[in-house]
Amino acid sequence: AMAGLRSENRFVILTCEPSAPIAHIHNRMPVILDSAGEQDWLNPDNAFADLTPLLRPFARAFEITEAPRAVQLQRELFG
C-alpha cells in the first residue's frame, strides 16, 4: 500500500527520499507502507504527527529489472 491523502474528489500519493536501490532512478519514491503501517495510516484516531515516522523510504529490498524496449520507447514519447 502507498500512503496518500484524499479531499473530496482529489487524491495525492505521498513521496519521500528514495531507498538506495531506487536513488539512481529518481530522487523521490512513493511512501510504501507495510501491513502494520497501513493499518496505522488508515486509523482515523491517529494524529498526523504520530504517523510521520511512516514517511520514510521502504526498508525491504526491491527487485529491479530493466523495462523492455517497447516500454522505453513509450517513455520517450513523454520525455
Image (tube, rainbow, N blue to C red):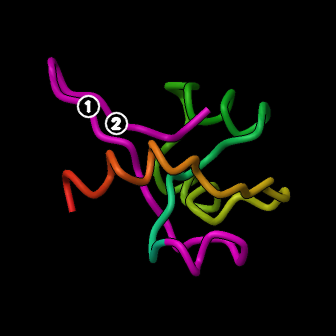
Q: Position of residue 50 (x, y in %)?
A: 58, 53
Crowd class of label 2 (few under 14; some 14 to 19; many from 20; radius 10 Å): few
Crowd class of label 1 (few under 14; some 14 to 19; many from 20; radius 10 Å): few
- The reply to whether discs 1 and 2 touch (Cβ–Cβ < 8 Å) is yes
Type of amino acid at the residue the image marks with label 1: Phe
Report which quarter residue 43 is drawn in: top right
Q: Nearer the viewer, mark 1 or mark 2?
A: 1
Region in magenta: 1-25
Read off the residue under disc 1.
Answer: 11
Q: Is 53 or 19 nearer to us in this picture?
A: 19
Query: Looking at the image, which residue is at 47% across and 72% down?
Result: 26
Report the residue that reaches farthest toward the top. Answer: 9
Query: Looking at the image, which residue is at 64% across and 57% down?
Result: 66
Magenta stretch containing residue 8, yes or no?
yes
Q: Position of residue 45 (x, y in %)?
A: 54, 28
Query: Looking at the image, which residue is at 55% across and 52% down?
Result: 31
Report which quarter residue 74 is drawn in: top left
Read off the residue under disc 2.
Answer: 5
Q: Position of residue 10 (x, y in %)?
A: 17, 28
Report the residue that reaches farthest toward the right. Answer: 61
Does 76 sit left or right of 2 as displayed? left
Residue 18 position (above or below residue 34): below
Type of amino acid at the residue the image marks with label 2: Leu
Does 5 sit left or right of 16 as displayed? left
Q: Is 48 or 76 nearer to us in this picture?
A: 76
Query: Looking at the image, which residue is at 57% across and 47% down?
Result: 68
Residue 10 position (above or below residue 73): above
